[in-house]
Amino acid sequence: MTDQNAGAKDELAGRSNSAIESSKQALFDLSRDVHAHPELNYQEHYSSAALAGFLEGNGLSVERGIGGIDTAFRAIIPGGGGEGPTIAVLAEYDALPEIGHGCGHNLIAMAAMGAALGLRANAQDLPGRVVVIGTPAEEGGGGKIRLLEAGMFEGVDATLSSHPFSNRTIIPGAAPKGESWSLAMVGYRYMYHGQAAHAAAAPEAGINALNAVIHLFTGIDALRQHLRDDVRIHGVITDGGTAPNVVPEFAAANFMLRSRDGRYLSDEVVGKVRHVAEGAAYMTGARLEVEEFYPFYENVQPKRDFGPGGGSQRKGAGN
Protein backbone atom coordinates (compact mmCIF):
# COMPACT_ATOMS: atom_id res chain seq x y z
CA MET A 1 0.00 0.00 0.00
CA THR A 2 1.39 3.39 -0.96
CA ASP A 3 1.76 6.21 1.55
CA GLN A 4 -0.97 8.10 -0.30
CA ASN A 5 -3.41 5.18 -0.08
CA ALA A 6 -2.52 4.60 3.55
CA GLY A 7 -3.16 8.24 4.30
CA ALA A 8 -6.53 8.17 2.55
CA LYS A 9 -7.50 5.03 4.45
CA ASP A 10 -6.51 6.61 7.75
CA GLU A 11 -8.55 9.69 6.92
CA LEU A 12 -11.64 7.61 6.16
CA ALA A 13 -11.19 5.56 9.33
CA GLY A 14 -10.74 8.69 11.40
CA ARG A 15 -13.88 10.22 9.98
CA SER A 16 -15.89 7.07 10.75
CA ASN A 17 -14.47 6.81 14.23
CA SER A 18 -15.33 10.43 14.95
CA ALA A 19 -18.91 9.93 13.81
CA ILE A 20 -19.31 6.88 16.03
CA GLU A 21 -17.55 8.48 19.00
CA SER A 22 -19.76 11.54 18.86
CA SER A 23 -22.85 9.29 19.08
CA LYS A 24 -21.41 6.85 21.61
CA GLN A 25 -23.74 7.78 24.46
CA ALA A 26 -26.79 7.69 22.19
CA LEU A 27 -25.73 4.23 20.98
CA PHE A 28 -25.29 2.99 24.54
CA ASP A 29 -28.70 4.37 25.47
CA LEU A 30 -30.26 2.66 22.46
CA SER A 31 -28.70 -0.67 23.42
CA ARG A 32 -29.98 -0.39 26.98
CA ASP A 33 -33.44 0.57 25.71
CA VAL A 34 -33.65 -2.51 23.48
CA HIS A 35 -32.29 -4.67 26.31
CA ALA A 36 -34.99 -3.35 28.64
CA HIS A 37 -37.74 -4.28 26.17
CA PRO A 38 -37.10 -7.92 25.16
CA GLU A 39 -39.43 -9.17 22.44
CA LEU A 40 -39.73 -12.62 20.87
CA ASN A 41 -39.33 -13.32 17.17
CA TYR A 42 -41.66 -11.40 14.88
CA GLN A 43 -42.96 -9.46 17.90
CA GLU A 44 -40.14 -6.89 18.01
CA HIS A 45 -42.42 -3.89 17.49
CA TYR A 46 -40.84 -1.71 20.16
CA SER A 47 -37.26 -2.55 19.24
CA SER A 48 -37.66 -2.22 15.49
CA ALA A 49 -39.40 1.13 15.93
CA ALA A 50 -36.61 2.32 18.24
CA LEU A 51 -33.90 1.34 15.76
CA ALA A 52 -35.71 2.74 12.73
CA GLY A 53 -36.36 5.93 14.68
CA PHE A 54 -32.67 6.18 15.58
CA LEU A 55 -31.70 6.00 11.90
CA GLU A 56 -34.35 8.55 10.95
CA GLY A 57 -33.17 10.81 13.74
CA ASN A 58 -29.73 10.72 12.17
CA GLY A 59 -30.98 11.78 8.76
CA LEU A 60 -31.60 8.45 7.04
CA SER A 61 -34.78 7.48 5.24
CA VAL A 62 -36.15 4.17 6.55
CA GLU A 63 -38.53 1.78 4.81
CA ARG A 64 -40.48 -0.19 7.39
CA GLY A 65 -42.29 -3.50 7.07
CA ILE A 66 -40.10 -4.78 4.24
CA GLY A 67 -40.48 -8.28 2.84
CA GLY A 68 -43.94 -8.62 4.32
CA ILE A 69 -42.56 -8.58 7.88
CA ASP A 70 -43.89 -5.82 10.11
CA THR A 71 -40.77 -5.66 12.26
CA ALA A 72 -38.21 -5.60 9.43
CA PHE A 73 -36.81 -2.38 7.99
CA ARG A 74 -34.25 -1.05 5.53
CA ALA A 75 -32.27 2.15 5.07
CA ILE A 76 -30.03 2.85 2.07
CA ILE A 77 -26.88 4.96 2.28
CA PRO A 78 -25.87 5.81 -1.30
CA GLY A 79 -22.22 6.17 -2.11
CA GLY A 80 -20.77 9.06 -4.02
CA GLY A 81 -17.73 7.42 -5.56
CA GLY A 82 -19.23 5.75 -8.61
CA GLU A 83 -19.94 2.07 -9.26
CA GLY A 84 -19.08 -0.36 -6.50
CA PRO A 85 -20.39 -3.17 -4.32
CA THR A 86 -23.52 -3.10 -2.23
CA ILE A 87 -22.76 -3.98 1.37
CA ALA A 88 -25.55 -4.86 3.79
CA VAL A 89 -25.17 -4.19 7.51
CA LEU A 90 -27.49 -6.45 9.49
CA ALA A 91 -29.18 -5.57 12.76
CA GLU A 92 -30.76 -8.20 15.02
CA TYR A 93 -32.98 -7.33 17.97
CA ASP A 94 -35.20 -10.24 18.99
CA ALA A 95 -34.87 -11.87 22.41
CA LEU A 96 -35.19 -15.31 23.98
CA PRO A 97 -38.10 -16.65 26.05
CA GLU A 98 -37.69 -16.16 29.80
CA ILE A 99 -34.09 -14.85 29.74
CA GLY A 100 -34.56 -11.87 27.43
CA HIS A 101 -31.45 -10.68 25.62
CA GLY A 102 -29.26 -13.57 26.75
CA CYS A 103 -27.65 -13.65 23.30
CA GLY A 104 -26.96 -9.93 23.29
CA HIS A 105 -28.99 -8.92 20.27
CA ASN A 106 -29.25 -5.45 21.77
CA LEU A 107 -25.49 -5.22 21.23
CA ILE A 108 -25.81 -6.47 17.65
CA ALA A 109 -28.39 -3.76 17.03
CA MET A 110 -26.15 -1.11 18.56
CA ALA A 111 -23.17 -2.26 16.48
CA ALA A 112 -25.22 -2.07 13.28
CA MET A 113 -26.45 1.42 14.10
CA GLY A 114 -22.89 2.54 14.88
CA ALA A 115 -21.63 1.01 11.65
CA ALA A 116 -24.33 2.88 9.74
CA LEU A 117 -23.23 6.19 11.24
CA GLY A 118 -19.57 5.48 10.58
CA LEU A 119 -20.15 4.47 6.97
CA ARG A 120 -22.48 7.38 6.29
CA ALA A 121 -19.70 9.76 7.34
CA ASN A 122 -17.68 8.55 4.35
CA ALA A 123 -20.49 7.80 1.93
CA GLN A 124 -19.64 10.53 -0.57
CA ASP A 125 -16.07 9.26 -0.89
CA LEU A 126 -16.87 5.58 -1.32
CA PRO A 127 -18.12 3.65 -4.36
CA GLY A 128 -21.22 1.48 -4.20
CA ARG A 129 -23.73 1.78 -1.40
CA VAL A 130 -24.56 0.55 2.09
CA VAL A 131 -27.90 -1.01 3.02
CA VAL A 132 -28.84 -1.25 6.68
CA ILE A 133 -31.33 -4.09 7.11
CA GLY A 134 -33.27 -4.76 10.29
CA THR A 135 -33.58 -8.54 10.41
CA PRO A 136 -36.09 -9.83 12.99
CA ALA A 137 -36.62 -13.37 14.23
CA GLU A 138 -33.11 -14.75 14.40
CA GLU A 139 -34.02 -16.79 17.46
CA GLY A 140 -36.03 -19.54 15.85
CA GLY A 141 -38.04 -17.65 13.28
CA GLY A 142 -35.86 -17.68 10.18
CA GLY A 143 -36.31 -13.96 9.61
CA LYS A 144 -33.36 -13.60 7.26
CA ILE A 145 -34.58 -16.51 5.16
CA ARG A 146 -37.98 -14.88 4.74
CA LEU A 147 -36.31 -11.61 3.75
CA LEU A 148 -34.06 -13.46 1.32
CA GLU A 149 -37.04 -15.21 -0.26
CA ALA A 150 -38.83 -11.86 -0.51
CA GLY A 151 -35.93 -10.41 -2.52
CA MET A 152 -34.63 -8.07 0.16
CA PHE A 153 -31.04 -9.19 -0.47
CA GLU A 154 -31.18 -8.78 -4.26
CA GLY A 155 -28.13 -6.90 -5.45
CA VAL A 156 -26.28 -7.30 -2.15
CA ASP A 157 -22.69 -8.40 -2.68
CA ALA A 158 -21.73 -9.06 0.93
CA THR A 159 -23.19 -8.72 4.40
CA LEU A 160 -21.59 -7.50 7.60
CA SER A 161 -22.81 -8.66 10.96
CA SER A 162 -21.57 -9.14 14.50
CA HIS A 163 -22.31 -11.21 17.56
CA PRO A 164 -21.12 -10.87 21.15
CA PHE A 165 -18.86 -13.67 22.28
CA SER A 166 -16.92 -14.66 25.36
CA ASN A 167 -13.60 -13.47 23.97
CA ARG A 168 -12.41 -10.80 21.57
CA THR A 169 -12.40 -12.22 18.08
CA ILE A 170 -13.44 -11.05 14.64
CA ILE A 171 -12.96 -14.30 12.74
CA PRO A 172 -13.89 -17.27 14.94
CA GLY A 173 -10.61 -18.73 16.15
CA ALA A 174 -11.57 -20.12 19.51
CA ALA A 175 -13.40 -23.10 18.08
CA PRO A 176 -11.65 -26.48 17.73
CA LYS A 177 -9.12 -26.51 14.89
CA GLY A 178 -9.93 -22.88 14.14
CA GLU A 179 -13.37 -23.72 12.77
CA SER A 180 -16.39 -21.48 13.00
CA TRP A 181 -18.87 -22.16 15.76
CA SER A 182 -21.70 -21.25 13.44
CA LEU A 183 -23.10 -24.48 12.01
CA ALA A 184 -25.73 -25.26 9.42
CA MET A 185 -28.96 -25.94 11.25
CA VAL A 186 -32.55 -27.09 10.87
CA GLY A 187 -35.24 -27.89 13.43
CA TYR A 188 -37.93 -30.59 13.29
CA ARG A 189 -40.87 -31.43 15.49
CA TYR A 190 -41.58 -35.16 15.67
CA MET A 191 -45.15 -35.91 16.74
CA TYR A 192 -46.55 -39.34 17.56
CA HIS A 193 -50.25 -40.14 17.64
CA GLY A 194 -51.24 -43.21 19.66
CA GLN A 195 -54.33 -44.50 21.42
CA ALA A 196 -55.36 -43.57 24.94
CA ALA A 197 -56.28 -46.31 27.38
CA HIS A 198 -56.29 -46.90 31.11
CA ALA A 199 -52.74 -47.84 31.99
CA ALA A 200 -53.83 -50.30 34.70
CA ALA A 201 -57.24 -51.58 33.59
CA ALA A 202 -56.63 -52.03 29.86
CA PRO A 203 -53.07 -51.11 28.78
CA GLU A 204 -53.27 -53.61 25.93
CA ALA A 205 -55.92 -51.40 24.31
CA GLY A 206 -53.59 -48.43 24.09
CA ILE A 207 -50.77 -47.27 21.84
CA ASN A 208 -48.18 -45.40 23.87
CA ALA A 209 -47.07 -42.32 21.96
CA LEU A 210 -44.58 -41.41 24.69
CA ASN A 211 -42.80 -44.74 24.22
CA ALA A 212 -42.28 -43.76 20.59
CA VAL A 213 -40.63 -40.50 21.64
CA ILE A 214 -38.41 -42.37 24.10
CA HIS A 215 -37.37 -44.77 21.34
CA LEU A 216 -36.64 -41.74 19.16
CA PHE A 217 -34.20 -40.41 21.76
CA THR A 218 -32.46 -43.74 22.27
CA GLY A 219 -32.32 -44.35 18.54
CA ILE A 220 -30.69 -40.98 17.93
CA ASP A 221 -28.16 -41.73 20.66
CA ALA A 222 -27.29 -44.98 18.84
CA LEU A 223 -27.08 -43.10 15.54
CA ARG A 224 -24.44 -40.66 16.79
CA GLN A 225 -21.58 -43.15 16.35
CA HIS A 226 -22.35 -43.29 12.63
CA LEU A 227 -22.32 -39.52 12.08
CA ARG A 228 -19.40 -37.17 11.57
CA ASP A 229 -17.83 -35.50 14.57
CA ASP A 230 -19.12 -32.05 13.64
CA VAL A 231 -22.78 -33.11 13.84
CA ARG A 232 -24.84 -31.93 16.79
CA ILE A 233 -28.33 -33.29 17.56
CA HIS A 234 -30.19 -32.06 20.61
CA GLY A 235 -33.83 -32.21 21.56
CA VAL A 236 -36.49 -31.84 24.23
CA ILE A 237 -39.80 -33.57 24.88
CA THR A 238 -42.53 -30.97 24.50
CA ASP A 239 -45.54 -33.25 25.07
CA GLY A 240 -45.50 -36.50 26.99
CA GLY A 241 -48.96 -37.24 28.30
CA THR A 242 -51.09 -35.85 31.10
CA ALA A 243 -51.44 -38.52 33.80
CA PRO A 244 -49.43 -41.64 34.66
CA ASN A 245 -52.53 -43.86 34.72
CA VAL A 246 -53.44 -42.96 31.14
CA VAL A 247 -51.56 -44.33 28.14
CA PRO A 248 -50.39 -41.17 26.32
CA GLU A 249 -52.21 -40.79 23.04
CA PHE A 250 -49.96 -37.94 21.90
CA ALA A 251 -46.31 -37.14 22.46
CA ALA A 252 -43.86 -34.87 20.68
CA ALA A 253 -40.24 -33.76 20.71
CA ASN A 254 -38.38 -30.89 19.09
CA PHE A 255 -34.89 -31.55 17.73
CA MET A 256 -32.24 -29.25 16.33
CA LEU A 257 -29.88 -30.84 13.80
CA ARG A 258 -26.57 -29.14 13.08
CA SER A 259 -23.43 -29.72 11.06
CA ARG A 260 -20.47 -27.76 9.74
CA ASP A 261 -21.45 -28.98 6.25
CA GLY A 262 -24.90 -27.86 5.13
CA ARG A 263 -25.09 -30.38 2.32
CA TYR A 264 -24.14 -33.27 4.59
CA LEU A 265 -26.80 -32.11 7.03
CA SER A 266 -29.57 -31.90 4.43
CA ASP A 267 -28.59 -34.93 2.34
CA GLU A 268 -27.70 -37.41 5.07
CA VAL A 269 -28.32 -36.39 8.67
CA VAL A 270 -31.93 -35.28 8.20
CA GLY A 271 -32.82 -38.52 6.43
CA LYS A 272 -31.10 -40.74 8.98
CA VAL A 273 -32.92 -39.08 11.86
CA ARG A 274 -36.17 -39.43 9.93
CA HIS A 275 -35.53 -43.17 9.60
CA VAL A 276 -35.02 -43.41 13.36
CA ALA A 277 -38.28 -41.54 13.92
CA GLU A 278 -40.11 -43.88 11.56
CA GLY A 279 -38.60 -46.88 13.30
CA ALA A 280 -39.90 -45.64 16.64
CA ALA A 281 -43.36 -45.41 15.11
CA TYR A 282 -43.15 -48.97 13.74
CA MET A 283 -41.98 -50.31 17.11
CA THR A 284 -44.94 -48.86 18.98
CA GLY A 285 -47.70 -48.71 16.40
CA ALA A 286 -47.97 -44.95 16.72
CA ARG A 287 -48.48 -42.69 13.73
CA LEU A 288 -45.64 -40.27 12.99
CA GLU A 289 -46.07 -36.68 11.87
CA VAL A 290 -43.07 -34.42 11.18
CA GLU A 291 -42.97 -30.69 10.67
CA GLU A 292 -40.13 -28.22 10.26
CA PHE A 293 -40.28 -25.61 13.00
CA TYR A 294 -36.91 -23.97 12.30
CA PRO A 295 -36.00 -23.35 8.66
CA PHE A 296 -32.75 -24.59 7.19
CA TYR A 297 -29.79 -22.30 7.79
CA GLU A 298 -26.52 -22.67 5.92
CA ASN A 299 -23.31 -22.52 7.91
CA VAL A 300 -21.65 -19.11 8.03
CA GLN A 301 -18.47 -18.77 5.99
CA PRO A 302 -16.30 -16.00 7.45
CA LYS A 303 -13.96 -14.21 5.05
CA ARG A 304 -10.64 -13.75 6.77
CA ASP A 305 -9.44 -11.20 4.21
CA PHE A 306 -11.86 -8.64 5.63
CA GLY A 307 -9.20 -8.15 8.25
CA PRO A 308 -9.48 -6.71 11.74
CA GLY A 309 -12.33 -4.38 10.90
CA GLY A 310 -15.09 -6.96 10.66
CA GLY A 311 -16.31 -10.33 9.41
CA SER A 312 -18.62 -11.20 6.56
CA GLN A 313 -20.99 -13.95 5.65
CA ARG A 314 -22.56 -15.23 2.47
CA LYS A 315 -26.03 -14.19 1.49
CA GLY A 316 -28.58 -16.56 2.95
CA ALA A 317 -26.24 -17.89 5.57
CA GLY A 318 -27.60 -17.82 9.02
CA ASN A 319 -27.06 -18.33 12.64
Image (cartoon, helix red, strand yellow):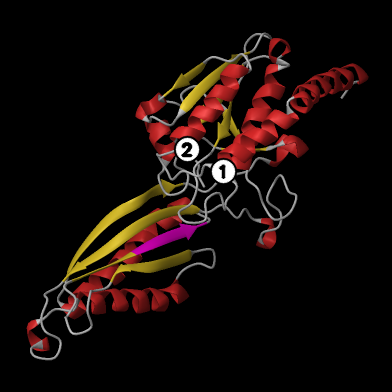
Mark 2 or mark 1: whose residue is earlier in sequence: 1
Asked which quadrant contains residue 88, the reply is: top right
- Contact between marks 2 and 1 (CB within 8 A): the answer is no
Q: Which residue occupies the extreme bottom position in the image?
A: 200
- Circle 1 sits in a helix, a strand or a loop, which is it? helix
Q: Position of residue 98 (x, y in %)?
A: 47, 56
- Vertical order, 207 against 165 (above or below): below
Residue drawn at 45 percent across, 73 percent down: 224
Q: Position of residue 61 (x, y in %)?
A: 54, 14
Examine the residues drawn in magenta and state their main secondary structure.
strand
- Vertical order, 101 against 254 (above or below): above
Q: Quadrant of the N terminus?
A: top right
Q: Does 256 appear in magenta?
A: yes
- Circle 2 sits in a helix, a strand or a loop, which is it? loop
Foreground disc of the pair 2, 1: 1
- List the residue tagged with mark 2: 316
Q: Position of residue 240 (x, y in %)?
A: 27, 73
Give the residues in magenta. Answer: 254-259
Binning the other alpha carbons within 10 Å of mark 1 as few (below 14), some (14 to 19) or many (20 upward) gives few
- List the residue tagged with mark 1: 36
Residue drawn at 54 percent across, 68 percent down: 229
Binning the other alpha carbons within 10 Å of mark 2 as few (below 14), some (14 to 19) or many (20 upward) gives some
- Observer able to see residue 13: yes
Left or right, 33 with reference to 296: right
- Vertical order, 114 against 85 (above or below): below
Nearest the eye: 145 or 110: 110
- Vertical order, 136 against 208 (above or below): above
Q: Does 199 appear in magenta?
A: no
**Callout 1, which amino acid?**
Ala
Q: Where is residue 17 in the image (x, y as percent from the top left)?
A: 79, 26
Asked which quadrant contains residue 269, the reply is: bottom left
Measure how far apart labels 2 and 1 are at the Cα level: 30 Å
